[in-house]
Image (tube, rainbow, N blue to C red):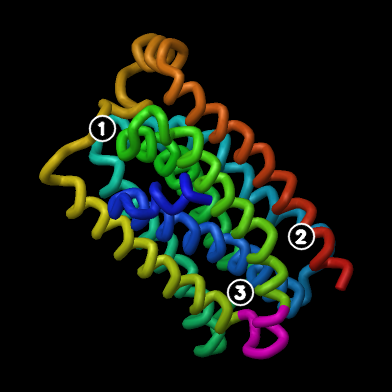
Amino acid sequence: MRAYRRLLRRRAFALLWTGATISALGDGLSWIALVWLLLELGGSSGSIGLLVAAYTGPVIVSGLVAGHLLDRFDRRRVLIVDNVIRGLAIASIPILSATGNLATWQLYAVAIVYGSLFMISLAGVPTLIASLVPDDELTTANAMETMSYAIGGLAGPALAGLLIGAFGASNVLLLDAASRLAARSSSGAATTSTSSSGSRTPGCARGRGVERLAISRSTPRCRSAWASIGARTASSARSRSRSARETGSW
């Protein structure tokens, strides 16, 4: 516990971790809410399968795009843009529902947008962590980042079920949209707190092609980050599919 407290005293890391945890929790909320709304619109088990495909399918292609964006631009700013776009996409659903214009295809469209940007946070956060903490604290930092993802994956769907029963699926999506703004604020503050001193390392997402592979294989902090990304990508796909099946059975 002492190691965790020491890390949280690093303002830049604490802000990034807080934003990542809020974002992961919002992921869990929004996914269950989208499936619930699909069922309310008369969706079948086949429709839920299409929604799962719309969400997880773009992850394969978007991983390449996310790597390019993280190479080309400042990673903190990319994370901010990611949260803003996903927040606006999610917010569009309750607005359409309130005006009586919500259709099934719009849920699929939002799922595609959400899935297309998913790899930005999945890859951006662990590679950014590598530039915020020293080597002797990297293992603990990665453990905390994994913990935030676990919080979102486990507590998010459970909390979504309670909130949907109390306030409705559309309002839960509004909550996720608000969480994106909170995550954006945390990422922005982390940018400010580290801009004067700069990153400790060039990060694990820098470089092109063979150069990036060489960096990842030769640097322990980069190997740790990319291993975390791979494990969580596979876990996310399984989690979304399982949540959809369980929600559909309700």
Residue type for callout 3? Ala
Q: Which of the numbered marks, if any, corresponds to residue 244?
A: 2
Tell whether label 1 touches label 3 (CB within 8 Å): no
Task: Spot the residue most to the right.
Answer: 249
Indicate the secondary structure of the residue bearing disc 1: helix
Tell me which secondary structure the magenta stretch mostly adopts.
helix
Q: Residue at x 29, y 51 (%)?
A: 12
Quarter occupied by residue 227: top right
Secondary structure found at label 2? helix
**Figure quadrant of residue 45:** bottom right
Viewer-closest of 165 and 46: 165
Q: Position of residue 36 (x, y in %)?
A: 71, 73
Q: Residue 22 appears at what percent x and percent y?
A: 48, 63
Residue 167 counted in the magenta span: yes
Distance between the alpha carbons at the discs numbered 3 and 2: 19 Å
The residue that appears at 65% across and 72% down in the rendered structure is: 33
- Mark 3 and mark 1 lie on one chain; the one further toward the N terminus is 1
Residue type, label 1: Arg
Indicate which disc residue 103 carries.
3
**Camera-nearest residue between 224 and 242:** 224
Please report the bounds of the magenta region as a residue range: 162-169
